[in-house]
Image (cartoon, coloured by chain):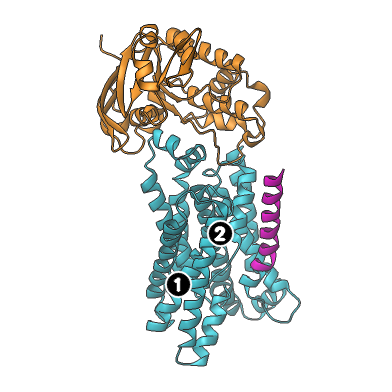
Chain colours: A orange, B cyan
Amino acid sequence: MSALVAAQGLSLPGRLRETSLELAGGTLTCLIGPNGSGKTSLLHALAGIGRPGGSVRIGGIDPATAGPAQRQRLLAYLPASRDVHWPLAAADLIALGLAAPDAAAVDQVAEALDLDEFRGRRVDRLSTGERSRVLIARALVAEPKLLLLDEPVSNLDPRWQLRLMDHLRSLAHQRGQALLVAMHDLELARIYADRLIIMHEGRIAADGDPRALLEGPHIPQVFGIERAGEGWRPLA
Amino acid sequence: MRARLILLLAATLLAFFLLSLLTPWQPLAELMDRDPALGWAVLQELRLPRALLALVYGAALGASGAAIQALFANPLASPDLTGTTSGAALGAVVTAYLLGFAAPLALSIGSVAGALGALLLLLALAGPRAETATLLLSGLAISAMAGALTTLALALASSPFAFYDAYEWLMGSLIDRSLAQAAFAAIPALAIVTLLQRLAPALDSLALGEEVAQSLGHDIGRLRLRIVCLTAIGVGACVAICGAIGFVGLIAPIFARRLTGGHPGRAILPAALIGGLLLLAADLVTRAAPLGRTLPIGVVTALIGAPFFLWLVAHMRWKLAR
């Protein structure tokens, strides 16, 4: 069976070297790498942001040629920034993820992310963590085949980091969505990732089983850190 | 809900339009009794163009204001505060200086070119996602430059009468325009309102930032260019006929967003309706003022709009300080 997402020769000048990648449905893939290694650029290229080179097919369809409604069912992208430029109500912001109004879909995602009490509140009056959940809900609401999430757990408290990762894993395993999640927390990646991709200097440095990669030579080489008991410490 | 809001605004707009046609009622009724033909002529040739211009100019300012506020992600971006109106006035004055006021098409083209130049300069100076201070300072600089060049062109004018005409036109006036002149403003104004309204989904998604808008398939560069061109055409065409009228493009979108739950793109059509409403109301105020003569409408919108602007700035500061 061919992969749900197939990307050929993706590139962004100065940020991402030519990269090909397949992502299977039902898989949560974590994307790690130091600052500036190209994690966000890979997500951008897959989401069609910044005129990337190469081609992307999601379920055989090129998102660049899809209309707005179809595109929202193909992919969603969550940027690392939590800025919202206008003081929309949380429920209205979530609904921006839908091409046509669908109250049931908004209800469902609001319940999953425990946002019911914030629905009518303006997003500029929420805490950063609460606003993060609203923005994540916007990305999830259309149930796209491919979810590209840039640091979804940053700004979340430890309980919500785990709850969110649980939810994302269930989206992959139960609904068959393909998830590519950029993050910095190696421990969360070890617990939740079905597959791990390590970025370094604008290209994929390693790709495979999370546990094997996290114990292998790539982490010291790429991040400049080494195992120290349960945790990590910077290399001298 | 949204359809009802639009309908309500449209009905109010229609009521104000009719009110504008029939105000003042007394002399019109007497004239209709004495000489119906003359009465109809007054209605058709004096009052209709005036009411129509108030409606379409207000609509163009409202829709343009909403679109550039959405584009710059800033509630203080508006045709006048970004220097677009001054640029249009400069374009028209320079054209008039070269060709005279009697060439309406050339005047419109000159005015649109001036507005376009001002907006492109603003984008180059302040960037597409400007901080409020950068945006306003760039707008101020462009306005000052355009204003100085406009005054220079007027000072070089051959006759003092030309100077006075141009001065009165610059103050903004809807009076003594023919139906043909009104059409010169109305057709582009209504066209740009329709076209800007079609960009609403892209502008709404821009509330989440350019990256998300791009991931949803919107070409931001093209969107920016379209809004700049459409705004320049709408504002330019109206300025060429009626001169510069301030603050409507700032206020109308702010009210409109209050009615549409803060959605920047969805506010475009309501902003157009509210803009038309505001200018019709301001025009009625110019007639009601007990000064024995009609006030320039640009003065009325500035007298109402400037305190509103001050309130807005104070409100934003207060919010930031919190």
Judged from the image, the secondary structure of the residue bearing numbered disc 1 is helix
Pointer 1 residue: B180
- B247 or B52: which is nearer to us? B247
Sequence order check: which comes first, mark 2 or mark 1? 2
Image quadrant holding the C terminus of chain A, namely top left
User: Which residues lie in the magenta part?
Assistant: B301-322
Residue B140 horizontal/vertical position (percent): 54, 65
Q: Going by the image, does A111 lie left or right of A233?
A: right
Q: CA distance from mark 2 to mark 1?
A: 36 Å
Looking at the image, residue A66 lies above or below residue B184: above
Pointer 2 residue: B136
Residue B304 horizontal/vertical position (percent): 69, 64
On whether residue B277 falls in the magenta region, the answer is no
Looking at the image, residue A201 lies above or below residue A213: below
The crowding category of the residue bearing disc 1, from other C-alpha atoms within 10 Å (few below 14, some 14 to 19, many at least 20), is few
Q: Are marks 2 and 1 on the same chain?
A: yes
The amino acid marked with disc number 1 is Ala
Count numbered badges in the picture.
2
Q: Residue under mark 1: which chain is it in?
A: B
The crowding category of the residue bearing disc 2, from other C-alpha atoms within 10 Å (few below 14, some 14 to 19, many at least 20), is many
* Residue extending furthest toward the bottom: B159
The amino acid marked with disc number 2 is Leu
